[in-house]
Image (tube, rainbow, N blue to C red):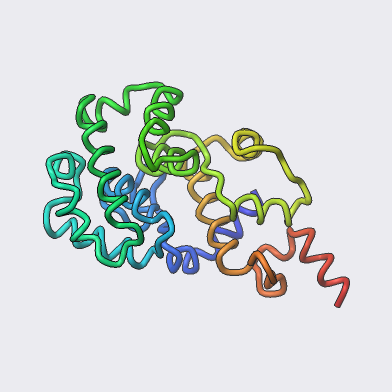
Amino acid sequence: MKLLKVFEGISDRLRENGWFIDKPESPSWWGGALSPEEVIISAILVQQTRWERVTEAVVKLRRSGLNTLRALAELNPVDLANMLTGINFRFTKANRLVEIAKNIVSIGGLEALSKLSDDDVRGMLLSMDGVGHETADSIMLFALNRLTLPISTYTIRVINRISGVLYGDYEEWRIRLMSLLPKALYEYKLFHAGVVTTGKEWCLKGKPRCSECPLHNQCRLARLNAGKG
């Protein structure tokens, strides 16, 4: 809970990194998305691409009326790729987006997907090309408002440095951290936004900026580094 309070206090830095604190069920947490479908689209586009580029691409799709799964499902992947300038691996991602859109539309769209169990939703997402565990859980949490927690490399680095704890595989990290958080959408979304922002801004892989980090009072590594000084 202390971490969540800190994350609320750095809402401006979260926003600079593409995270918008809002009502629990709002899609705008994820890069200011206007709909769950935009969350899904940008979750694919953001892989190995800067948020700024993704935002520009989503705005372009929105203006062209191509920010829905039904519209993408009917689009030629090459035509979509030509619109995704600035997106790394845009032809691969265009193919993936069109296929993902077709798969979801074929079962009845997001309305039908939302009626499936968490396990079935995760299984369907993971069966799609380009959707790994972190992307699947991001879509479930931020687009479908399911209580699950994406685990990124930032999550592992930040929590390990704060607590000294190192869990096992992806699933163990997800289950352990979910057990420590209040089971609510707001807290899950805020936690993910906060640890990713902390990992990008202060808890750097090579040389962490502990003295500047808003979590330094809660962090084991920051205390150790301060002692060395």
The residue at the point 78 percent across, 62 percent down is: 221
Name the quadrant of the C terminus.
Answer: bottom right
The residue at the point 22 percent across, 61 percent down is: 59
Q: Nearer the viewer, residue 176 or 168?
A: 168
Q: Nearer the viewer, residue 213 or 187?
A: 213
Left or right, residue 221 beside residue 76: right
The residue at the point 47 percent across, 45 percent down is: 186
**Residue 54, image x, y percentages:** 32, 61
**Residue 62, image x, y percentages:** 18, 56
Residue furthest bottom as drawn:
229
Placement of 120 over or under 229, stated as above or below: above
Left or right, residue 150 beside residue 214: left
**Residue 214, image x, y percentages:** 64, 67
Q: Quadrant of residue 17?
A: bottom left
Q: Quadrant of residue 135?
A: top left
**Residue 142, image x, y percentages:** 40, 44
The residue at the point 37 percent across, 49 percent down is: 43
Placement of 127 over or under 222, stated as above or below: above
Left or right, residue 126 beside residue 104: right
Q: Nearer the viewer, residue 131 or 210?
A: 131
